[in-house]
Amino acid sequence: MAPTPPASPSDTSQPHGTRRRQTGLARDLGLAIVSGRYRPGDLLPNEIDLSRRLDVSRSALREAIHTLSAKGLVDARPRAGTRVLEPRHWTLTDPDVLDWCLEAGDASSDLLQALQSLRLIIEPAAAALAAEHRTPADLTALREALMASERAGDDDALRLTAIGRFRSTLLAATRNPALESLTALCGLSDRSRPLPDYWPVFDAIAAGGPDAAREAMGQLIRETLHPSSR
């Protein structure tokens, strides 16, 4: 029996929800895939059946499938149908895919653990490069971002915005465009509670010590993985 498709949220702004935003539909289907409701190798219901079940237009469904295909979650072929791909094909550094995996929770625990392990490889090296290549302007931006984070107090939304600015500035300071593209992956640490303390990382980068920056970032990531070690 085919898996039950995700429920279609109501859309009071358009009749029958047929013009629901494509991004919302892609999210619903993406969550169904990363949570295991649709498993690797499964064929999604055909376009006519799935659009009826979800109460969306076929054009909206096509756009959503195109989005999922671009992110590596599905392989859509004429007459062959749309098949769910294995996680090794997923674009795991894509912000949407990361968000879906986090929202799926335990269903994606192995995948999230793999991503955290990847962070331990990438982020300490990025901090070391930032310590070598940062400019005075970079340091000012990094400091201001952390100060804004502190001023945010208990407002998680404001604090996350400030920390996101710190993180993107740090990656830009590496002067490596490939690392700059990994902002979403590096943001996994900001999902932890309490939010991690980036000041030791800043201090090491400001001092221009690559080894100290590498160790400070590695310690930050380890603490987010194992909060009891603090």
Image (cartoon, rainbow, N blue to C red):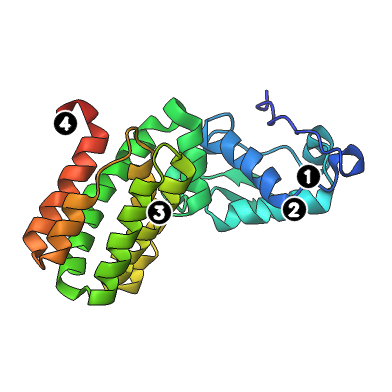
Q: Which residue is mark 2?
A: 62
**Mark found first going from the N terminus, 2 or 1:** 1
Q: Residues within 10 Å of mark 1 (few under 14, many from 20)?
A: some
Residue type (three-letter) at the residue carrying disc 2: Arg
Left or right: 117 in relation to 23: left
**Mark found first going from the N terminus, 3 or 4:** 3
Q: Residues within 10 Å of mark 3 (few under 14, many from 20)?
A: many
Q: CA distance from mark 3 to mark 4?
A: 23 Å
Q: Which residue is mark 3?
A: 162
Residue type (three-letter) at the residue carrying disc 1: Glu
Which element type, helix, strand or loop, lies under badge 3? helix
Label 3 or label 4, whichever lies nearer to me, is: 3
Q: Which residue is mark 1?
A: 47
- Front-lying residue, 168 or 27: 168
Left or right: 135 in relation to 149: left
Label 4 or label 2, whichever lies nearer to me, is: 4
Please provide percent x and percent y for residue 95. Answer: 48, 52
Residue type (three-letter) at the residue carrying disc 3: Ala
Q: CA distance from mark 1 to mark 3?
A: 42 Å
**Mark found first going from the N terminus, 4 or 2:** 2
Report which quarter residue 49 is drawn in: top right
Q: CA distance from mark 3 to mark 2?
A: 37 Å
Q: Which mark is residue 211?
A: none
